[in-house]
């Protein structure tokens, strides 16, 4: 697992040149706002604000994912997928998912809770700290070719095919 973490960090450094991601909501640890409100988690289930800038050429759209790589499942746990974010957009507002404040044209995918939109952190009780990786992708297409009922993994695979660069924020949470 340590090798996988090192490879992730190296690949993020290589792919993040010319693209930077920041957030006022996210830090080293998630707070109650980003925690799921269900399954005894008792959070507020508010999607984080995200801000980015790029100096890259050829960016036609952006996508965002939030992924728990420590979830006890083969593919981890996908908390949020937003795609087809127009290339002139440089932020997502806090609560954009639940408040329907996504930029015009942007779409949300189905998370691993089974609904479309943001689903906050909710790791098993007494488990080790989980790492939640929020990643911004700069893409070379304006629209992804995905079905409206596609899973987060399906959308992620399509994102991977068109990624020019990416930048991530890693936050931890446990209960």
Image (tube, helix red, strand yellow):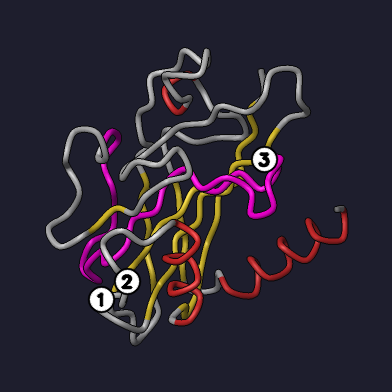
Q: Position of residue 91 (x, y in %)?
A: 29, 52
Measure the alpha-carbon separation of dots 2 and 1.
9 Å
Which one is nearer the viewer's eye here, 59 or 106? Answer: 106
User: What residue does disc 2 label?
Assistant: 146
**Disc 3 to disc 1: CB gap under 8 Å:** no
Q: Is residue 92 magenta?
A: yes
**Disc 2 to disc 1: CB gap under 8 Å:** no
Tell me which residue sits at (51%, 48%) in the image.
Answer: 78
Comes first in the chain, label 3 or label 1: 3
Query: Magenta segment, which residues?
Result: 67-95
Secondary structure state at the residue bearing disc 2: loop
Tell me which residue sits at (48%, 81%) in the image.
Answer: 161
Q: Position of residue 122 (x, y in %)?
A: 56, 27
Left or right: residue 136 versus residue 28 is: left
Tell me which residue sits at (68%, 46%) in the image.
Answer: 73
Q: Residues within 10 Å of mark 1 (few under 14, many from 20)?
A: some
Question: Dividing the picture into quarters, in which one does residue 85 lie?
Answer: bottom left
Left or right: residue 82 versus residue 7 is: left
Comes first in the chain, label 2 or label 3: 3
Tell me which residue sits at (87%, 53%) in the image.
Answer: 2
167 up-or-down from 142: above or below = above
Q: Position of residue 123 (x, y in %)?
A: 63, 28
- Residue 71 badge: 3
Measure the alpha-carbon separation of dots 3 and 1.
29 Å
User: What residue does disc 1 label?
Assistant: 143
Q: Residues within 10 Å of mark 3 (few under 14, many from 20)?
A: many
């Amino acid at each position: 697992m340590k090798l996988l973490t090192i490879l992730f960090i190296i690949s993020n450094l290589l792919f993040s040149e010319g693209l930077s991601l920041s957030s006022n909501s996210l830090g080293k640890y998630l707070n109650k706002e980003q925690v799921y409100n269900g399954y005894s988690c008792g959070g507020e289930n508010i999607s984080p604000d995200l801000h980015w800038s790029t100096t890259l050429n050829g960016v036609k759209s952006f996508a965002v994912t939030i992924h728990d790589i420590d979830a006890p499942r083969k593919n981890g746990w996908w908390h949020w997928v937003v795609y087809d974010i127009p290339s002139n957009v440089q932020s997502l507002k806090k609560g954009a998912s639940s408040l329907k404040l996504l930029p015009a044209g942007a779409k949300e995918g189905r998370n691993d809770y089974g609904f479309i939109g943001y689903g906050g952190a909710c790791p098993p009780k007494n488990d080790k700290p989980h790492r939640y990786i929020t990643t911004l992708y700069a893409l070379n297409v304006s629209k992804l070719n995905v079905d409206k009922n596609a899973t987060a993994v399906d959308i992620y695979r399509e994102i991977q095919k068109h990624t020019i660069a990416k930048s991530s924020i890693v936050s931890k949470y446990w209960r």
